[in-house]
Image: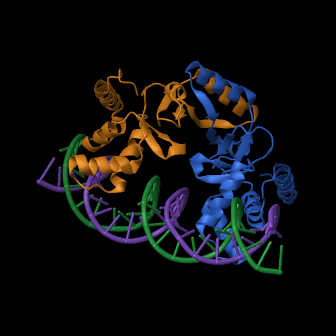
Chain colours: A blue, B orange, C purple, D green
Amino acid sequence: MSALHDHTHCIADALTRADALCTERGARLTALRRRVLELVWSSHRPRGAYAILEDLSQQDGKAAAPLTVYRALEFLVEQGLVHRIESLNAYVGCAAPGAAHSGQFLVCDGCGDAAEIDDPGVGSAIVAAAAERGFHVQRPTVEVRGLCKSCQEKPR
Amino acid sequence: MSALHDHTHCIADALTRADALCTERGARLTALRRRVLELVWSSHRPRGAYAILEDLSQQDGKAAAPLTVYRALEFLVEQGLVHRIESLNAYVGCAAPGAAHSGQFLVCDGCGDAAEIDDPGVGSAIVAAAAERGFHVQRPTVEVRGLCKSCQEKPR
DNA sequence: GTCGCAATGTTATAAAGTAACACACATGTC
DNA sequence: GACATGTGTGTTACTTTATAACATTGCGAC
């Protein structure tokens, strides 16, 4: 996340879009779920469920149970507001909720950032490769580990 | 896995190739590691570390500790003899060790099978998409969830 | 043989995720 | 307004997955 990045605005924006989407769908973005979404976005990086749980406990004073967080995350993932990064056991805010979310990530091992991309070439190559083998795609997952641009420039 | 599939031969073959590869590299495929590799292959499906641990305990009579299995798996993954399926927290034998292993899987939610593929189109699309964003790819992970051919044909 | 190092064993613990059941609270119905 | 209903949340306990720290074994080089 660059210093130029207006992160506060970014969180607010995500919450606004989430409100709109859930209203539109008749899904209930409760206070708790909204708060968890905010905490997911708070770092702009993938965060573990237990990290979010800690925030919830410390910042809000109430000692929540793991299930509380997991249930909220489950809802948010279902609504496409949050993605789960399988290879990190962590969650990250969806950059473009509402749009088709293809689940493609460039995960930097240097800074921990996970850039969501939606590359049509990757998507169609996967569908084609699957079709060739008679496989019906339901949920493609692409998590590319490596180094982002800025982490390559300042090695170690 | 089809009934036509000669699974015994398949395991034996995997072990033979592993022996050859490790000898070639000067890597030590010890009895334990070889046994774990065999157990990974035993189902031809992704298996959890603790499932392998149970096999080891029950079939071999010795109550092994988790670390024993995890260390063996770590070695096998490093050598490219086994892949980890992130979205399942499970391990599966590599179909083509020695060759470039691109880590692409078609994971069937019906039967649990994980078919390893090495689709050049998918691979190059990922590299291209990453390059476009200045991202240096180290380890691409593609895990496509869906239904394999035979599971589509017999629904439920 | 014995030194050195890699592999394995042992014990304990951390991290991630789920099950079962009780309670709270909004909404619609009467 | 009481009440039924269903969804969301709280609570407790537990399972599964994974790692840390340190002791011991055993192989190969010399």
Q: Where residue B126 appears, x then y in whole percent?
A: 66, 30
Left or right? Give the position of B148 relative to B56. Answer: right
Tell me the residue at 87%/52% (across/down).
A20
Q: Where residue B108 appears, x then y in whole percent?
A: 52, 34
Tell me the residue at 31%/25% (across/down).
B13
Above or below, comparing residue C30 to residue A145 in the picture: below
Whether residue B104 appears in this view of the structure is no
Q: Where residue B106 appears, x then y in whole percent?
A: 54, 31
In terms of depth relative to the viewer, which is nearer, B51 or B82? B51
Left or right? Give the position of C1 relative to B148. Answer: left
Above or below, comparing residue D18 to residue A106 in the picture: below
Number of numbered discs: 0
Whether residue A116 appears in this view of the structure is yes
Tell me the residue at 36%/55% (across/down).
B66
- Residue C28 sits in which quadrant? bottom right
Q: Where residue A68 appears, x then y in whole percent?
A: 64, 66
- Residue A102 sits in which quadrant? top right
In terms of depth relative to the viewer, which is nearer, C11 or B136? C11
Tell me the residue at 44%/39% (across/down).
B46
Left or right? Give the position of A23 relative to A61. Answer: right
